[in-house]
Image (cartoon, rainbow, N blue to C red):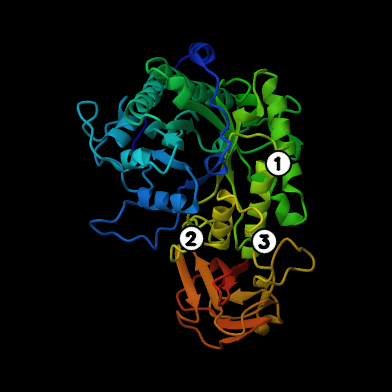
Amino acid sequence: MRSRRRTRPLALAALWGAAWAIAATSAAAIPLRPTAVAKRFGVYAWGFDDSSYTVCPTCPDRLNWAADKVAEAGSRTIRVYLGASDPYGVNPPVNPEDAGYLARIVAGAGYPSFTSETAYAQLFADPRFDTYLLTVYSPADNRGDWTDGYGRDEADLEREQIAQLGDVLLRGFRGKTFILLNWEGDNAIHGHAGDPTAWDSYVAWARTRAAGVRESQARNAGGARRLLAGLEFNLVRRNGVWCGSDDSLAHRCVLDYVGSRVDVDYYSYSSWDTLAIKAFDPTANLKQEIGASLGYALDLLRRAHPGLTPANLLLGELGFARTAPRNGECRAAQYLKELVGALAAPDAFGVSYAIVWQAIDNAPSVDVDGGTFGLFRGSDGGPTLSGTVFRSLLRGGRDKATAPLACPRLNACHDNPANSCGAVNAEADWTPRFSIDSTLSIFGLNFSRAGNAVQVIQGGRRYVLPRDGGFAWHESPGQVNVALPPGLEAGPAFVYVTDARGLDSNGQLLDLQP
């Protein structure tokens, strides 16, 4: 591993003062909250399964291929990653880590002398989109350089990298709006949450990024209306207590500690902690749950920023996995419909944007449960039930966006209904204990009489049974038997059933023994 050169330390108070002065004096009112649902409800495209992506001379790159899916879903707002890790495989092959690093990803390797057609330039010029939420990470951000202190040289470089990116966006893509964000701050600082110095460094880092946005706004006419700074958090409670309820590190969160010290345009809540209520109580009211979380966040932020309104808040990530142990495809689609309806209601908490995770299913290697959040399937690129419902909602068909009532379901566990335990092993006393060559007996409801498929996911591999092999196949509306395929290894695997209509059941985690 290449050693990292430390820059000259900077007193955090001095850094905060410089960045705060820019952020506090240059901020302008945010744009009006969009009224059209197709603009308020966007879609994230990052870390998706690209197994159905085709490479050809006339095919779009992976970034714009995913953007096509977002446009097909009907949204005019998209969130993507832009930075050093290059998940779409479209960054310049040579890109020095200097002030122009981020700008070059958009403008091309010749920046600033000339620009070339890049994947990001194509996306930002796409007339199908109006607003872009960008999860922006420089190489230093990607390494987490702030975790062991934040130096003046590091801050100066970060600020100028953000500012030059802002210049390219404002000057090259007129009429478009860009919101620059971090990724889930509480997850980012999780490994250092017990270190007060790390918290102060994170504040300094966040202020520096906001200062870069303000610099670009100031040197571009109308910049404050089209280039906005954001801070993303993903906790409103920590260790069972509301964030910031006291001064203890155990209850400190990005919301209370960083949010109160950083002046940005938008505060983005990646809302998984709140939406998890559905795993335990499918009848929970999402409008009330989201309203309570956002209301608490706004009240807390207003202590330091009295002028904030609900429109200064975003839902940076929301969604429901089809194959989660308590879901299934019908429930996932119904929950998404409920949430969109709750946020679009006249008396809803008025966030400016809500971003669905995600366009295409997560890559199987990302989530042990296959990550079936997509509006489109990773396996074949076709729309999921959630995608069909979402598209109908964005077209104004709230009453017509219905889901079937009889999706396939694996049986729930009697002692823990939040999990599935319908897959058992007859040779292990009908318990969910399996070796790598066991035969599964999967019990549940609403399987097809014929044409079911059992999907087993382990790491980045997906096995579709019985097509990929196996024996002892049996199927009926209440039971499917299948032998596990060759090639599995000891460790976690995930299983679910796809019926003849192509609808997925909830899933079950298996611990395979040698």
Count of numbered circles on the image: 3
Quarter of the image for residue 315 reads top right
Q: Amino acid at mark 2?
A: Pro
In the drawing, does residue 326 fall left or right of residue 397? Answer: right
Q: Residues within 10 Å of mark 3 (few under 14, many from 20)?
A: many
Q: Position of residue 206 (x, y in %)?
A: 51, 25
Residue on which the image places disc 3: 331
Residue on which the image places disc 2: 364
Nearest-to-viewer mark from 3 and 2? 3
Residue on which the image places disc 1: 290
Q: Amino acid at mark 3?
A: Arg
If you read the primary sequence from the N terminus, does the residue marked by circle 3 or circle 1 appear first? 1
Q: Residue at x 70, y 19 (%)?
A: 303
Quarter of the image for residue 124 reads top left
- Which quarter of the rendered picture does the N terminus lie within? top left
The secondary element bearing badge 1 is classed as helix
